[in-house]
Image (tube, coloured by chain):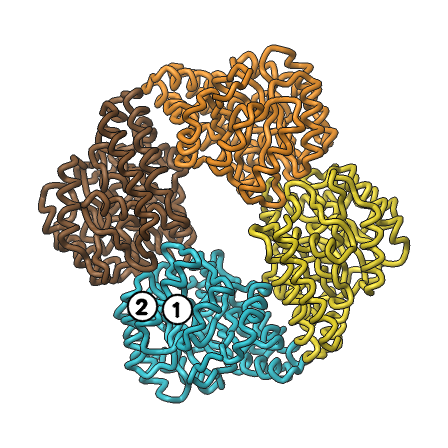
Chain colours: A brown, B orange, C yellow, D cyan
Amino acid sequence: MINRKIKPLEGIIVPLVTPLCGNNRIDIDGLSNLVEHVVRGGVHGIFILGTTGEAQSLSMSQREEMIKETSRILGNRLPLLVGISDTSLTDSTALAQKAYECGAYAVVATPPYYFATAQSELIDYFENLISLLPLPLFLYNMPVHTKVTFDPKTIKRIAQNEKVIGFKDSSANGTYLQTVMYTMRDDPEFMIFVGPEEMTAEMVLMGAHGGVNGGANLFPELYVELYGAAKSHNIEKVRRLQQKVMQISSGIYSKGKYGSSYLLGLKCALSVAGICSDFPAMPFTRFDEEYRNKIEQEMVKIENLLHTGKM
Amino acid sequence: MINRKIKPLEGIIVPLVTPLCGNNRIDIDGLSNLVEHVVRGGVHGIFILGTTGEAQSLSMSQREEMIKETSRILGNRLPLLVGISDTSLTDSTALAQKAYECGAYAVVATPPYYFATAQSELIDYFENLISLLPLPLFLYNMPVHTKVTFDPKTIKRIAQNEKVIGFKDSSANGTYLQTVMYTMRDDPEFMIFVGPEEMTAEMVLMGAHGGVNGGANLFPELYVELYGAAKSHNIEKVRRLQQKVMQISSGIYSKGKYGSSYLLGLKCALSVAGICSDFPAMPFTRFDEEYRNKIEQEMVKIENLLHTGKM
Amino acid sequence: MINRKIKPLEGIIVPLVTPLCGNNRIDIDGLSNLVEHVVRGGVHGIFILGTTGEAQSLSMSQREEMIKETSRILGNRLPLLVGISDTSLTDSTALAQKAYECGAYAVVATPPYYFATAQSELIDYFENLISLLPLPLFLYNMPVHTKVTFDPKTIKRIAQNEKVIGFKDSSANGTYLQTVMYTMRDDPEFMIFVGPEEMTAEMVLMGAHGGVNGGANLFPELYVELYGAAKSHNIEKVRRLQQKVMQISSGIYSKGKYGSSYLLGLKCALSVAGICSDFPAMPFTRFDEEYRNKIEQEMVKIENLLHTGKM
Amino acid sequence: MINRKIKPLEGIIVPLVTPLCGNNRIDIDGLSNLVEHVVRGGVHGIFILGTTGEAQSLSMSQREEMIKETSRILGNRLPLLVGISDTSLTDSTALAQKAYECGAYAVVATPPYYFATAQSELIDYFENLISLLPLPLFLYNMPVHTKVTFDPKTIKRIAQNEKVIGFKDSSANGTYLQTVMYTMRDDPEFMIFVGPEEMTAEMVLMGAHGGVNGGANLFPELYVELYGAAKSHNIEKVRRLQQKVMQISSGIYSKGKYGSSYLLGLKCALSVAGICSDFPAMPFTRFDEEYRNKIEQEMVKIENLLHTGKM
């Protein structure tokens, strides 16, 4: 039995958007608003510098600034998870050091994403990385962006190191995630978190620890309540709230023409809601007036749905 | 509201293996054994000539023989679904005619799988196909083999024709399947079936109609009982039975070295269980002695698990 | 040294379009026109029932009709190659038998394309297939449609059987094709043909035996002349003719919106040129008026280019 | 007509390996040896921080060190091209600034490689990047690592800016590269360089400006001579030298088990040849004794081939 020496998390972790000013600077006021918004919404943790946080599009110094500022604003109110995914082991380690100095709970890393690695190379890579980390680690599976999937046996192997405390899966592959959960069944403290909000409730019903759901930037209460319904096996409530999550997914994340729709839609909706600005980092640009109007209309529909439906 | 004039199915539909003799002939005795085995196991329907049934590896005349023989053996005991997936519209239609003559309940079709089609071409194709079909149709999403995914809006569009009665998804993508279910939410009689047995229970909890699970060839009672537990929202039982399904998945379907592991493992296990022979159709060959021994060992473990666990 | 007992081909083999009437019947008059057109154009062989021939979209009986009719029209004027690619070994063999009865020179087969096979399975499959074939075989690499690539070592292994006489590559991968040629360097009678007409000339310069170029349906003389220029190392002429081939490629094959552009553009251009009708088989439909107009304009440009340039 | 104000390059540009000590530091002595080796070998330019240079696996400060040191060692002897590919526009720009200060000839950039971009987003991204660059730019197409391919029309659009001076293609797709060359046919000063050494000669025959060939780290004279033969249309010599290049490709780059074979084989061979050490940056590790022995044997074969053959 692996002794992880850390209290496991459960519930909803927000993969925090990185609010930006138009000139590629971090929008500190927006960040402060956003952190207060999600804390007020009852989420169980905050994850910065993930895919939703556009970490890869930020410079190294912007990523360090984001760690420092979020930590300052959040204080000790919630566990802070920090993405350190990079193609350079050295730069990943530097980000982890910064996270440690700022009091983060854990770091989170994908496989390196320029060169695709074989599973044995992935094991080598993570064994090296872990030996240099001052904080516990979540593995982060994100094959659409990294081209590499953690084999369930690879996860089990890497997780023999007690510093590896959990796994976040954004593959959306239900068979795969069940296989990971089954492979790790003798290690119940190893945390399994689900990226896609559309399938978080069902995976919590089946035993996952929670979700890392982008929509919780916008409507944190909804995702917290859905998690709670799943955790308490209230299927009727789960199905009712799932409809609202699906309306957000189909209304907000699918408006653009490309793969960037999720990010641009989410940032636009946060701006419409008055929480922070809508500028993404390059290579993306914010929605134009036409798309913003569509998001505004969707937000009216969703607000109605949230407040008239029984939650 | 679309009036489908057909009683919807729910539960477990077996994607029937096609028992073969070594010389590429259908093993009629094996087929008879297998049909009796799954009927006795309580499944709710039988689907022949799907991926598990190796339809594409059979000649046109073998496929027609399979329709005729299964129909004869099964009689009216259960609804019979017949795969007509082909790259030729003409040959698909001929198979559907045969299915109709043999009293099948419905036919099932993937997109054509040599040329990849755009969504608008897929709509055209299915509108043409449907106009020629003497039976209701299930759409069958199997992107790993066909390279094409039905867009949820494409499904909705095609399903405006009342002859289109359901959708079988083998993508394993939880976000996708939730999006299909949400897109079809106003059409509750439109049947949604899940291919991967590893994620059927969770999708039934969330509202899917059932599973088309390969393992039900081998242990039909287990899949029927898991379906029932999910249908009645018995989460504890679902989780307990899910462990057994995962043991089958990881023990039987993952023994070979290639993508054919699932099929070869399943056929080998059926042979070990004395139900039918283990010959696959070309391009595959059956497991050698080394792999058969592994399957035998797994079967002992699984039988123990099934009979000592409370089911 | 493998003794192949067959005179190798060199030059341009036309992957013949299958002319169709609107109601999914073979257009025999169109077929006759097309065969006469390409024979007159000086091509060195005819390949029916390939990808350009839409073999997979035709029923088994249509494919047999196509073999019979083309053979009848062509007589002994040119070598006839017949595609037998199918997912069923039995049906592939039946097509080969028909080709043999009709006097074909050789058959051509891709890997089976529903189930993806590992290399060792591919070797097994082809060893089985070859043992049943009454005619010599070309291997046909077409990974975009079949999902499977012949490893160069697999080709060498399969080609140890003297019935395997050549390889047609439609991968468009220059590194791959050079590696195949290098792997087969001690077997100079093993024929290497290039599918994409955009890269045939350069591969002939480097030692390939010729091209199987779709554009030769339309402008057979151009492709024959380009082949001749490359064969005789006339680089200036190669570069000049290459510009015309590229104009056809960019003008005719890129007009539609989807992956079907090549096929629909080619069939439309053949119809504009008065050679045969433009109906494709399902899952595709012919260009509408808007696209036909574009093709008409391109054809004027190309005819000018062909007749004013020195050929 | 675009006035590029820069003398175009032709010939062989070495994508320089980054020599490393075991502890993830740049091996300055090895770098010096390597630079002298390739300069002596007659190459026409040096490209650092590309894929072969493992740029993504180096930290930002290591990349800056590599620019400074290579520039110092090389002096003005040859044009220096510097890879600035990154997922962060800000960090790419910082690398370009360093390259400018060190007197580089041009910079080279792939699309950002975490988020995949649509073509219109790619155009936006590069227009932004170019406006910030103090040096001319080569576009670098490397879809296997970046997931994104430059559409030929996108290249033409971006190249309307006179600061964009060339294109390096590592797709290995012959049809694609011909289409790019055809699309840019009215802009003959726009440089087209070919990544894969296996297909460089044929593309130079067809009009490309040269190759960016990894093997030129090891045997620069061979690649320079092959380029010269192709440039002067000496087909017999091209074919003879191509055999040697193919022997290097199949002997050195294919020994490992994974996608890292090319890099690990090349670095191992450089170490066997006494030029620099064989340590790769993480996520890779150098070949063990077994693989090093294989490379040693191949090097003996290749040296024999190079010195006995007429070059």
Identify whether B29 is placed above or below C233: above
| Residues at discs 2 and 1 in contact (Cβ within 8 Å) | yes
Position in image of residue B239 (x %, y %): 35, 23
Res D271 visible: no
C-alpha separation, residue under disc 2 versus residue under disc 1: 8 Å
Disc assigned to residue C261 = none
**Position above or below: A289 against B277:** below
Instruction: Please state which amino acid type lies under the numbered disc 2.
Output: Ser
The residue pinned by badge 1 equals D109
State left or right for residue A181 relative to residue B87. left
Q: Report crowding for label 1: few under 14, some 14 to 19, many 20 or more residues within 10 A (C-alpha).
A: many
Element on which disc 2 rests: helix
Give the secondary structure at mark 1: strand
Q: Residue at x 25, y 25 (%)?
A: A309
Q: Amino acid at mark 1?
A: Ala
Tell me where residue D180 appears, x and y as whole percent: 54, 68
Q: Is residue D111 above or below residue D239?
A: above
Foreground: C24 or B173? Answer: C24
- Where residue D229 appears, x then y in whole percent? 62, 82
Task: Say the numbered circle drawn on residue D92.
Answer: 2
Q: Chain of mark 2?
A: D
